[in-house]
Amino acid sequence: MKILLASPMKPYPPFVNGRDNLHLNYGNCTYGQDIFSVPTSMHFYGLHLIAQNVGVPSTVLEHPTKRMFSREIRKGYDVVGISFNLPFFSRVLRMARMVKDISPGSKIVLGGPGVQCFARSTGKEKELLSIVDGVCHGDGVRYMREMLGEDADKPIRQDLPLGAIVPFRQKFLTQSSATLISRLGCSNGCDFCAASAFFDHRRIQIADPKELFIAIRAYLEKYNVSSARILDDNFLNEPEYVREFGRLLMNDPLCRKRNFTFCTFSSLETISRYDYEELVRYGLSGVLIGYESKFVDKLSPRVGKKLKNFNSHRMTADLLDHGIFIEGSMILGWDFQSPENIMEDIDDYVSLGATMDQIVPLIPLPETRMWRQLESEGRLFNDLSWDTAGFYSKWHTFKNFTHEELWKYGDVALKKAYGTLGPTYLRYFDVQLRGYRKFRNSTDARLREVAAMHRQECEGLYPIFATCRMFAPNSMVREKVKSLRQAYLSEFGSPSLPNRLKAKMLVGIGAGSWFRNRLVRERAIQPKSEVYTYKGASVEIL
């Protein structure tokens, strides 16, 4: 018995309506920042998690070409699993046809958020269903274990591929970090949230606090990393879990020696349950928070409860002062937004001063409450195409905007955030400086360690100042660069010779990026094809 687990074939989709529909180039958190937009690597973590937790040999194909996928399925796998997102529907249909033609004895299983397409089975969805042998809706590890006749409740181990950011698209500047999964799904059930709907608004535990800690410890011993992103749509929602996990990190010599930090997902509601110094002691370095809109009272109860009765500006400033960076999220296209009030909403979001921005149009996705509501109102388009799924798809009628009008407001919002706050690099330095100043004179030894870590981050970021100044979008941002550089010199003195040399190098690299952005038409970056093999083994938690 052997299984093949594959992501959709390359090439990845072209731009939709002239726009990077999936923000694959940079991830949407630094989208629209010119040369300072940061390319990120993308892994299909669910495939690796399955392969590492079944007792049979497995091969994982990430971003295969058609030739690579064809060659692999000729090896006669017993099971071929394909994980996909909605925009890859047509190529997954082609992949399923290929498997049936080349290896008819292989069982085909589909998984990932893309299977939500079957909520609207009209034509090609029916064809795809007729070809495949199974559809995994939810927890892939449990599904595959049950299909293979294995114990579905065995502990889950995880050694997922490292994620990375690649500043200026220069590989030698790559910064790697670990990725871990603690739980799947979210019980909040926000109307627009596809992840919550995909797991039926439930929380599925992948690792308890000790298991998550052991996985992090293994990363630190195996790789030269000091940070991790914990994938959990509302990680801070269970304080007992977080505190047990945090104490394990805080009391571990290797974690403290490596200055280990982690970022994750939260909300104003859940993070309000903690003292921020407590979270800093555990190693929390950043959170993604959905602000959605300043008009909280007009949001649906499920969305509004995360924001109602909380002072978002005061809480955001306090988090930043504690050295915790914020990836902020705002949605455009709510029914209550109009040309008369949308700029007020955008201005309020920008004034929060988030470190990164995720400003995107409202998109109804299958199985969500938003989808069902718009369908009942007759506002979904009958001819929508899964292949155009993304931030700039035309799937439904906005109440007060055309799609083109809303996209322009999105451009205005991103430009305003960039032009007011500067590039994410600069904002990140500001957060590190604030954290250093907060804890440098603390009587708590752990918090002084945190201050030392912030100082190290500040020193590592110094070389970006010259590039930020030279390619700043306006004089306001140049003044901010000047002010922060002066603050650096006041706190830490003159930069080291290596940092001064690196600053000159980055200016040259930045100039090359600036010219490339203006001379070469932007197109989707095609990720590298990768093959991973797993032997299959029993799981042991020490």
Image (cartoon, rainbow, N blue to C red):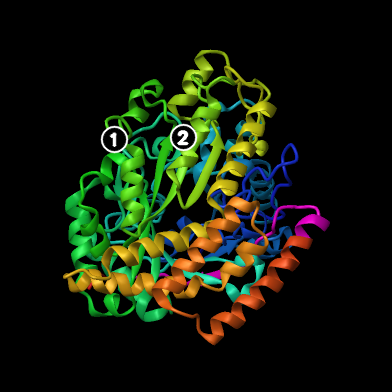
**In the figure, is residue 501 to the left or right of 247?**
right
Residue at 37% in and 30% down: 303
- Please state which amino acid type lies under the numbered disc 1: Phe
Q: Is residue 353 above or below residue 157?
A: above
Residue 471 location, quadrant: bottom right
Look at the image and tell me whether residue 162 can be seen. no
How far across and how far down the image is residue 216, in percent?
Answer: 33, 69
Residue at 70% in and 47% down: 13
Residue wearing tag 1: 310
Q: Which quarter of the figure is the C terminus placed in?
A: bottom left
- Please state which amino acid type lies under the numbered disc 2: Asp
Label whose residue precedes the other's in the sequence (2 or 1): 1
In the depicted view, which residue is nearer to us: 334 or 536? Answer: 334
How far across and how far down the image is residue 438, in percent?
Answer: 29, 62
In the depicted view, which residue is nearer to us: 264 or 89? Answer: 264
Residue wearing tag 2: 348
Quick check: is 530 in the magenta stretch? yes
Residue 188 location, quadrant: top left
Query: Which stretch is magenta?
Result: 516-537
Q: For label 1, count other residues whose C-alpha is less than 10 Å away and answer few (under 14), some (14-19) or many (20+).
A: few
